[in-house]
Amino acid sequence: MKNWKNILLTALAVVLLIGFAAAVPSPSISDEAYDAYMDLALSDE
């Protein structure tokens, strides 16, 4: 019976980690945001 508890807890941990990874937004930025940043950086010089 103890073995089943470990398996269920491990499965729960995996599901929670996958859910957290899916909920975190991607670190990539859009092309429009990159262009706006580059225009701002160039205009400050």
Image: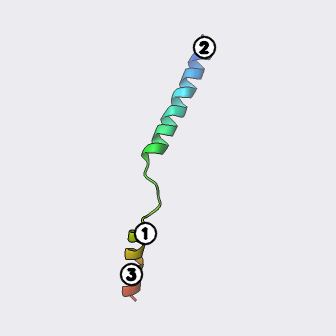
Which colour style is shown? rainbow
Say left or right for 7 vs 12: right
Q: Is residue 11 above or below residue 25?
A: above
Residue neighbourhood size for the residue with mark 2, other residues' Cα within 10 Å, grouped as few (<14), some (14–19), many (≥20)? few
Q: Amino acid at mark 1?
A: Asp
Mark 3 and mark 2 lie on one chain; the one further toward the N terminus is 2
Q: What residue do we see at 42% from left, 72% from top? A: 34
Q: Amino acid at mark 3?
A: Asp
Q: Which residue is mark 2?
A: 2
Q: Amino acid at mark 2?
A: Lys
Q: Which residue is mark 3?
A: 39
Residue 15 badge = none
Helix or strand or loop: what does disc 2 sit on?
helix
Looking at the picture, how far across and down is residue 7, in whole percent? 59, 22
In this figure, what is the number of numbered marks?
3
Quadrant placement of the C terminus: bottom left
Looking at the picture, how far across and down is residue 5, in whole percent? 56, 17
Q: Is residue 9 above or below residue 19?
A: above
Residue neighbourhood size for the residue with mark 3, other residues' Cα within 10 Å, grouped as few (<14), some (14–19), many (≥20)? few
Q: What is the C-alpha distance between the residues marked 3 and 2?
A: 61 Å
Outermost residue, top direction?
1
Eye-nearest disc, 2 or 1? 1
Quadrant placement of the N terminus: top right
Determine contact: label 2, label 1, CB under 8 Å.
Answer: no
Residue neighbourhood size for the residue with mark 1, other residues' Cα within 10 Å, grouped as few (<14), some (14–19), many (≥20)? few
Question: Which quadrant of the view contains residue 41?
Answer: bottom left
Q: Which residue is mark 1?
A: 31
Q: What residue do we see at 42% from left, 65% from top? A: 30
Helix or strand or loop: what does disc 1 sit on?
helix
Determine contact: label 3, label 2, CB under 8 Å.
Answer: no
Q: What residue do we see at 63% from left, 16% from top? A: 3
Question: Which quadrant of the view contains residue 6?
Answer: top right
